[in-house]
Image (cartoon, rainbow, N blue to C red):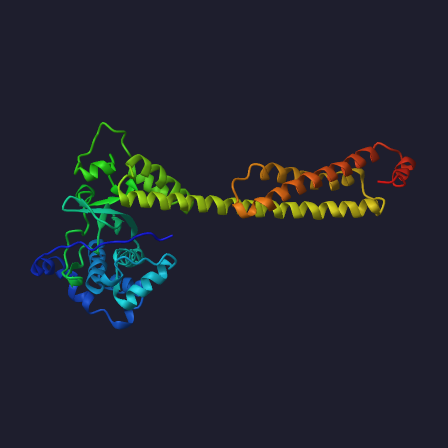
Amino acid sequence: MKYILCLLFFQTVALAQVKSFYADVERTMQSIPENQKKSTKEIASFIKGKFTSEELQIKAAYYYVIANVSYDVSHEFTVNLVISDDDMVSKTIASKKGVCIHYAKFFREIVSNLGYNCQVISGYTKQNNAIADQSHAWTAIQMKDQNWYAFDPTWDSGFVQNKKFVRRLNSKYYKTKPLVMLQSHMPFDSIWQFVNYPITEQDFISNKYTQDTNKVQFDYKETIKTYLTLSENEQLSDLKTRMIQTGYKNKLAKERFEILKKQLETFSLNANIKELNAISNSYNEGINLLNEFIYFRNAQFKPAKEDRQILEMISKPIIIFEDCSDKIYKLGFVGQDNLYDLNKFKRSIIDILEQAKNHKSFVETYLTKNERERKKMFLIKK
């Protein structure tokens, strides 16, 4: 679920300062052929062909995004909850418009195609000591020195004046160091603070950025490395834990936390339903095996099998049904609409397991008899 809304930073900067910063990539990036502007892969390919150093490649990607995307004031508070990342980036390329999440994902995709580890970060910001009304998205890249640096292409692209976007390129939020970024950007997840002693929500509000070495040191680099290998559900679970530690009392953090809880509930529900379907499949497999045995028993165990094969034939479905019974009583919530069918399924497992055990009891008795007595057992009404 996408949840990010964002506001453009209001800023002013002298254009001459910007040109001096981007001068080493500006002219080259302005010359990119039209046929190489259609995808992030093509844009990255162009950059690779023109620049070889890490610094220039990333700067070229950053410049391209902030120079070509205009802040979409008319959709400032509009969020598409279902669009994929690929579609979002494609539409940004085509329209050359977007809000913070579009800037961030567009930049990330170019940089990722260049071969760098770039992540989109979500959180909230502070301007003039006041928390913004909407959440925000920016990016971070792990450079070759293995350190993480923040990049905010939205805030460096320009500003909004009289409800109109004014492009005014800046470099204030290019390759920003962690403690500098924390003065205005607070990630929802503390791992993206990139510090060994993460600040809390209240620290951010109170402008307290000094690292408190009395706290337990946090190895954010290793934590991020592990985090990026986790499933989405595991990542969300870790985020919940860290948000509790950091605090989520302000409006934006509280909203994110509520969405997070719903996301985790959905993951849990989907996982339980998936498990229920797996139990159902196993149950059906057991039914097929039991039916094969019943057919064989009705044929008076013909064609003949060894005793151990007959016992194994009835034991297999019992093992399956016992496993189904064990798993279904450990199963979590599967939704109110599924409760009736779930309880019905539980009773079915109990009933079929009892039937299968009765058949096994017959086999165990059968195996103790001689040939003549065995034949008589089939004449006894079941």
Q: Nearer the viewer, residue 73 or 26?
A: 73
Q: Quadrant of the C terminus?
A: top right
**281 relative position to 376: left or right:** left
Q: Is residue 22 visible?
A: yes
**248 relative position to 56: left or right:** right
Q: Nearer the viewer, residue 364 or 97?
A: 97
Residue 297 position by quadrant: top right
* 359 w.r.t. 125: above or below: above
Q: Residue furthest right?
A: 372
Q: Residue furthest bottom?
A: 34
Residue 315: x %, y % from top left? 72, 38
Residue 43 position by quadrant: bottom left
Residue 321: x %, y % from top left? 66, 40
Q: How many marks?
A: 0
* 283 w.r.t. 153: above or below: above
Q: Is residue 72 visible?
A: no
- Which residue appears at 17% of the width and 37% of the height? 206
* 216 w.r.t. 60: above or below: above
Residue 51: x %, y % from top left? 22, 60
- Which residue appears at 29% of the width and 37% of the height? 247
Residue 136: x %, y % from top left? 25, 51
